[in-house]
Image: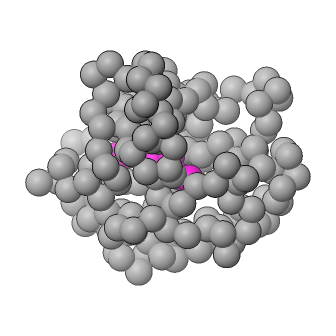
Amino acid sequence: MTDKLIVLDRDGVINYDSDDYIRTVDEWIALPGAMQALGKLTKAGYKIAIATNQSGIARQYFSEDTLDAMHTKMRTLAQEEGAVIDYIAYCPHGPDDNCDCRKPLPGLIHQIAKGLNQDVGGCYMVGDSLRDLQAGQAAGLRPVLVLTGKGQRTLDKGKGLEGVPVYDDLAAFVDNIID
């Protein structure tokens, strides 16, 4: 049996987002219920991967060391709830850098598939923006929109969301697929 995998965007899905970027470890704050939801996924046998655009690095708002510290904090909080984050893929580039990893392109999803040595087709991609969903769809994942972060704005625009399930937050999505 292929391992079950859930791919998540980070900012706005797992932690609070900011239009001014999450620039410090102290600014990285988990959304209510998110860590518990990750714990439920791990306990239900899912692998968890994160695909996140982090153009704040290219914009020199924070360093890769700071990003690593944010991810250490996230992993520690997740572990306290029994969760394992199996893989984190991030794009450090800016919008004009012409990389293949910046969502909506599927490069981060391909990195996850290679890093976990796993076929990701048919897995879920949970995000709060259209670009998250487009990246997942381009790699054969099933898109899911959460209304946290920029999710409500994305829903209000309504473009590209035909047939995409919508949940209030990560915890509601997890409860639905596990129950």
Vertical side of 171 occupied by 95: above or below: above
Quarter holding residue 65: bottom right
Residue 50 falls left or right of residue 1: right
Quarter holding residue 82: bottom left
| Image spot of residue 135 (x, y percent) | 52, 28
- What residue sits 35% from the left and 67% below the top? 33
Say whether residue 126 is magenta: no
Classify the position of the N terminus by image quarter.
top left
Residue 162 falls left or right of residue 156: left
Vertical side of 52 occupied by 110: above or below: above
In this view, which residue lies farthest toward the left? 179
| Image spot of residue 116 (x, y percent) | 48, 46
Nearer-the-camera pick, 21 or 120 = 21
Quarter holding residue 125: top left
| Image spot of residue 58 (x, y percent) | 84, 44
What stretch of residues is rendered in magenta?
A: 5-11
Nearer-the-camera pick, 15 or 86 = 15
- What residue sits 47% from the left and 33% below the top? 154
Classify the position of the C terminus by image quarter.
bottom left
| Image spot of residue 4 (x, y percent) | 29, 46
In this view, which residue lies farthest toward the front? 156
- What residue sits 30% from the left and 58% below the top? 171
In this view, which residue lies farthest toward the bottom? 80
Residue 8 seen from this side: yes
According to the image, what is the colour scheme of the structure? one colour
In this view, which residue lies farthest toward the right? 60
